[in-house]
């Protein structure tokens, strides 16, 4: 029922698939660069991407497929003005919004396509994939568009065109989800470094929708709905406390992880793994043209990249937000320390 509901509203408009010489040249160049780095890959000790470990010898082709499967949301220009008379580009202020979109998109991919799903630039006919991508198109009616997020941010005290922090984008995405009936994703935003397990299960008993919900007519939930657990943290005062490095690595090794959002001062990134002592991330700061009116068989290459950006843990801004997806009812319990007997799980 849950899976069917998500795709009940596939649109009927089509955006013709086009060839892009520049995109193909860029992709080929990136593949050649990675191939030239075979020695570099052979010297890697530990490499994790969203809970999956890559052991030696590392399959470069498989690694690139995994990286390029992640949805890459960047600055865009030329979309309809926000609120009718606002900006038509988010360049310079929307990077944390794009990172939040990437974390949420990864959550949907995990729920509806699975961790082993791989994107193919020539064969992407899966309707689940296209529906997920349509959630984030830069149009007013898309549930998680730049327009919707910026407008909802006003309610959090953030003016349109101003920068979001990790906690703010988590709160806004949570609110937007309560208005979207085609998915029954739930959010739990943990505060004070603690997850209250009892609170999660109590929360899941009631419908979270602000609109009339067909599945929960009496406002009660009889079945578990997928949960996105977000944990905002400050790991240091003015700079990242490196005592947390190993704990952060362990969080990226857990199979439930959907990455973390953070960055360095004034620049937000979406982190999806680590390579030895460096974090791996997707960079939203490239400004690309708005893509109009699309569904299946469009050219979607600008939503993917196989570039692996790296950042030393020591350069990370201390303000971050971790994300974990709990598809099944028992999953929140599995995030607890096995030695804990209380209903509160402390990560650090």
Image (spheres, rainbow, N blue to C red):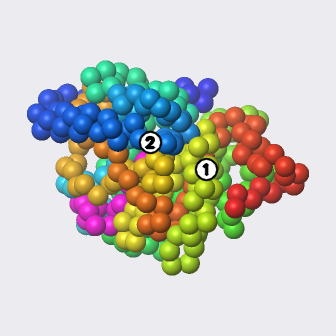
Judging depth in this view, the residue of 27 and 102 nearest the camera is: 27
User: What range is drawn magenta here?
Assistant: 87-104
Q: Which numbered circle lies on residue 75? A: none
Query: Which residue lies under the disc numbered 2?
Result: 44
**Pointer 2 or 1: first along the chain:** 2
In this rendering, would 144 be left or right of 341?
A: left
Question: Separation of disc 2 and disc 1 at Cα?
Answer: 20 Å
| Residue at point 44%, 29% (across, down) | 57
Q: Give x and y (percent) for residue 2.
A: 60, 30
Q: Which numbered circle lies on residue 251? A: 1
In this rendering, would 85 be left or right of 195?
A: left
Residue 8 lies, with reference to residue 167, above or below; the image says above
What is the count of numbered marks?
A: 2
Q: Give x and y (percent) for residue 137.
A: 33, 45
Find residue 219 and report its image quarter.
Answer: top right
Please name which of the two marks, 2 or 1, marks the residue nearer to the observer.
Answer: 2
| Residue at point 50%, 33% (across, down) | 55
- Indicate the secondary structure of the residue bearing disc 1: helix
Q: Quadrant of the N terminus?
A: top right
């Amino acid at each position: 029922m849950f899976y069917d509901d998500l795709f009940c509203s596939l649109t009927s408009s089509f955006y013709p698939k086009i060839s892009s010489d520049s995109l193909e040249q860029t992709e080929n160049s990136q593949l050649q660069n990675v191939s030239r780095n075979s020695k570099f890959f052979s010297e890697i000790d530990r490499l994790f991407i969203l809970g999956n470990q890559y052991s030696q010898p590392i399959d470069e082709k498989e690694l690139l497929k995994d990286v390029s499967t992640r949805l890459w949301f960047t600055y865009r220009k030329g979309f309809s003005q926000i609120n009718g008379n606002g900006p038509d580009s988010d360049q310079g202020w929307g990077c944390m919004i794009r990172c939040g979109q990437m974390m949420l998109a990864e959550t949907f991919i995990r729920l509806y396509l699975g961790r082993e799903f791989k994107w193919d630039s020539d064969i992407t006919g899966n309707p689940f994939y296209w529906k997920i991508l349509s959630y984030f198109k830069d149009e007013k009616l898309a549930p998680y568009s730049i327009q919707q997020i910026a407008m909802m941010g006003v309610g959090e005290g953030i003016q349109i065109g101003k920068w979001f922090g990790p906690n703010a984008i988590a709160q806004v995405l949570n609110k937007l989800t309560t208005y979207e009936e085609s998915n029954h994703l739930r959010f739990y935003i943990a505060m004070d470094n603690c997850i209250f397990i009892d609170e999660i299960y109590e929360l899941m008993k009631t419908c979270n929708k602000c609109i009339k919900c067909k599945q929960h007519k009496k406002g009660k939930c009889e079945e578990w709905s997928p949960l996105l657990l977000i944990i905002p943290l400050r790991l240091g005062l003015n700079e990242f406390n490196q005592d947390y490095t190993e704990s952060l690595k362990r969080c990226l090794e857990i199979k439930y992880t959907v990455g973390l959002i953070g960055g360095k001062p004034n620049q937000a990134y979406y982190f999806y793994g680590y390579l030895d002592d460096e974090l791996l991330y997707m960079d939203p700061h490239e400004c690309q043209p708005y893509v109009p009116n699309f569904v299946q068989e469009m050219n979607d290459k600008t939503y993917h990249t196989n570039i692996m950006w790296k950042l030393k843990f020591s350069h990370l801004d201390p303000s971050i937000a971790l994300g974990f997806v709990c598809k099944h009812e028992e999953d929140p319990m599995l995030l607890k320390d096995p030695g804990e007997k209380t209903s509160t799980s402390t990560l650090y």
